[in-house]
Amino acid sequence: MVSTRLLKNLPLEVLEQIFSYLPLCDRKSVSLVCRSWNNIVFSRRFLKDVTLNLDATWDRSKVYYLRTSTRRYRNLFVFVISDTCSPYNFEFIEEILKLFGQELESFQCNTKLSAIQLRNVIECVPNILELIVEVDATTLNHEQNFPAIRRLHRLESVNNVLQIRSLDMPKLARLKAKFATSLDAMESMDVLRRITPQLRSLELVSKESFSSIDELRCPKVEVLKLSGEIFIGSDAVRAFFGGFKCLKDVRLDIDVDDVMLGVIIRACPGIENLHFKNQYFESDTFQLLERLENLKTLSIDGSIDYRIKLKCKPLVSVTRFCFQLDILEDEASVFNEFKQMLPNVVDLGITLFAPENLDSVLVHACQHFPGIRRLTIYDAALFMCTVTDAGYQILGSLDRLEELKVDSADVEVEFMQPMVRLKRLEYRFHSIADQELMMLADLYPDLKYLGISWCANVTAQGVREFRARLPGCVVLLD
């Protein structure tokens, strides 16, 4: 009680600084202490990263309480169970927008809006910065005028939004566009050609062939992500990438052969982070990377033969290496080649998808990169791979490891080894339970951060006990 009284006497600026370190779940607890603290932790500043999630089917009763709330939410997500938004459901959305529309900076809806509904949304949110929406193509009228979205910084068009030719977004800097058909992409080209010269970040996803991509010019784009059926022929690649001047971060979730990779690297030698797929990596593939003198992150996905000999010069600028590889036998030989090519890697990301070679891949990767400080283990298989004794022993031998993230893979805490420098640990989609939290506290007494996401067996009581054991460790339970 004394400590609470002393805290109440602190200046507002100091309280804000203290509360800024708390995760949302703890800020909710703080808000119950008194009205003034509630006003602080749910002020406009602290609501920047908080999203109000509403279900149009089940959450209608919440409108009454939201009307009397002092919280001015900046981010809104509305879930509608149907494929299109009925007038009844849109009435609910409009009522929420009347309450928070002036403050809203982000609006997302999972269902298809009609063109008129989207226009009404835009009119209600004059300060919107981020819009993630889908439009029912059957309701589009190319002659219809839309109000300018003057502050919009990021747009995610799930489908058809870019077919609205009157869209005026003068400050748009980030665009993610998904196209279900070639016709969707074709009908969006007028708007795409107009806005891509102003973008800083561009992500395109197309389920069918997107043959007009060479018509786009992106001189300011620094971040590019492509997936699906994007390119037809090297001429389209050459024309598209020839329009980039500032490209630094590239993620290509498409098959990239050596011809295409060579065109991209020659056109954009300043790339710093590169992810690409290749059905069959060869030595020549990696030799092309020598030209990327500023490359910091290399991420690859595909197949590689254990007999490969990498003839390229060491890529000394690369400090982060991520891979998902189907290795044909003898992983030791492959990772020995990678170690020679990547001598300065301190951050390793391993994506597992074949249970039969989980341990051998993990062991050989860690043996050849013993100096890593960060390690991420992600399981992309349908059933979670289980790490065995050999895997636990190799993890325990990483005496410089400071950060470990386990995403979906099954790592049994009771078999884990001490890691003297470990400061940050994250679990996601895992079967970890309360009793294992106590084991982690004993194993890693110097832990400063523990993140737990989608771990259903962890309770609030378990987290409290862990915090009591390690008071200097921040715990985020999501």
Image: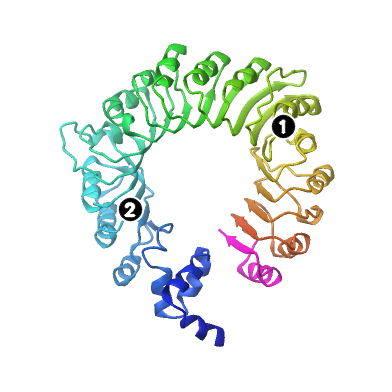
First in residue order: circle 1 vs circle 2: 2
Q: Position of residue 187 (x, y in %)?
A: 28, 25
Side of 55 relative to 475 (left or right): left
On screen, 429 above or below 140? below
In the image, taking residue 319 as reference, residue 153 lies left or right, namely: left
Q: Choose between 221 and 435: the one closer to the eye.
A: 221
Q: Of residues 442 and 248, which is closer to you in this image?
A: 248
Select label 1 or label 2 by which is in front.
Answer: 1
**Residue 1 visible within the image:** no
Give how far across and how far down residue 2 sits, in percent: 55, 87
- Whether residue 114 sits left or right of residue 59 in the image: it is left
Q: At 42% across and 75% down in the image, what residue appears?
A: 12
Query: At label 2, which amino acid type do we have?
Result: Glu
List x then y, in percent, for residue 326. Answer: 69, 27
Which residue lies under the disc numbered 2? 105
**Vertical position of residue 217 compared to residue 13: above or below:** above
Q: Is residue 107 left or right of residue 283?
A: left
Magenta-tinted stretch:
458-478
Under circle 2, the secondary element is loop
The quarter in which the N terminus is drawn is bottom right
Identify the amino acid type marked 1: Pro
The structure residue drawn at horizontal position 47% and vertical position 26%, both measured from the top left corner, is: 228
Q: Is residue 242 above or below residue 121?
A: above
Label 1 close to label 2 by CB (< 8 Å): no
